[in-house]
C-alpha cells in the first residue's frame, strides 16, 4: 500500500504544494488548492485574489516607471535636437 504522500506516479508531491504562498497555511491532502500563474498554490480564493491584487499593483507601478522614464528620454532627445 502506498503512502498518502505519494502521487499517482509514485513520486512524492512537489514541495511547493505544502503551504499557501501568501499566508503559509499548510495545504491539506483532501482540501482544494487554488492555483495562480502556473504553479503558485493558495489555500483559499481570498488569498489568491489578494496576491492577484498585489501583482496588479506592482505591474501598474512598473509600467508607470517605464512610461515616465521613456517620456523623460524623449524630452531629453528633443531638447538635444533643439540645441544642436
Image (cartoon, grey):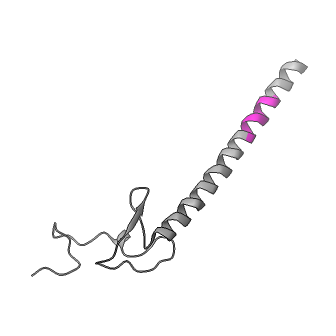
Residue 33 in percent (x, y) is at: 37, 70
Q: With 53 as the anchor, is 20 left or right in this view?
A: left
The one nearer the camera, 35 or 71, is: 35
Q: Where, quadrant-wise, is the N terminus in this rendering? A: bottom left
Residue at 79% in and 36% down: 72
Tell which of 37 and 84 is nearer to you: 37
Report the side of 58 relative to 37 (left or right).
right
Q: Main secondary structure of the magenta part?
A: helix
Q: Position of residue 63 (x, y in %)?
A: 65, 45
Assess whether residue 35 is covered by the magenta stretch. Answer: no
**Would residue 7 be found to the left or right of residue 27 on screen?**
left
Which residue is rendered at x = 20% and y = 71% of the image?
Answer: 7
Residue at the farthest front position: 45
The stretch in magenta equals 68-76
Provide residue 6's location: percent of width, then percent of height: 20, 75
Q: In this view, does 8 lie to the left or right of 16?
A: left
Amino acid at each position: 500500500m502506498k503512502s498518502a504522500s505519494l502521487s499517482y506516479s509514485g513520486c512524492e508531491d512537489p514541495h511547493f504544494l505544502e503551504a499557501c504562498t501568501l499566508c503559509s497555511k499548510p495545504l491539506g491532502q483532501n482540501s482544494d488548492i487554488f492555483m495562480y500563474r502556473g504553479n503558485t498554490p493558495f489555500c483559499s480564493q481570498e488569498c489568491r485574489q489578494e496576491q492577484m491584487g498585489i501583482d496588479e499593483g506592482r505591474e501598474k507601478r512598473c509600467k508607470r516607471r517605464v512610461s515616465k522614464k521613456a517620456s523623460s528620454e524623449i524630452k531629453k532627445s528633443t531638447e538635444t535636437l533643439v540645441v544642436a
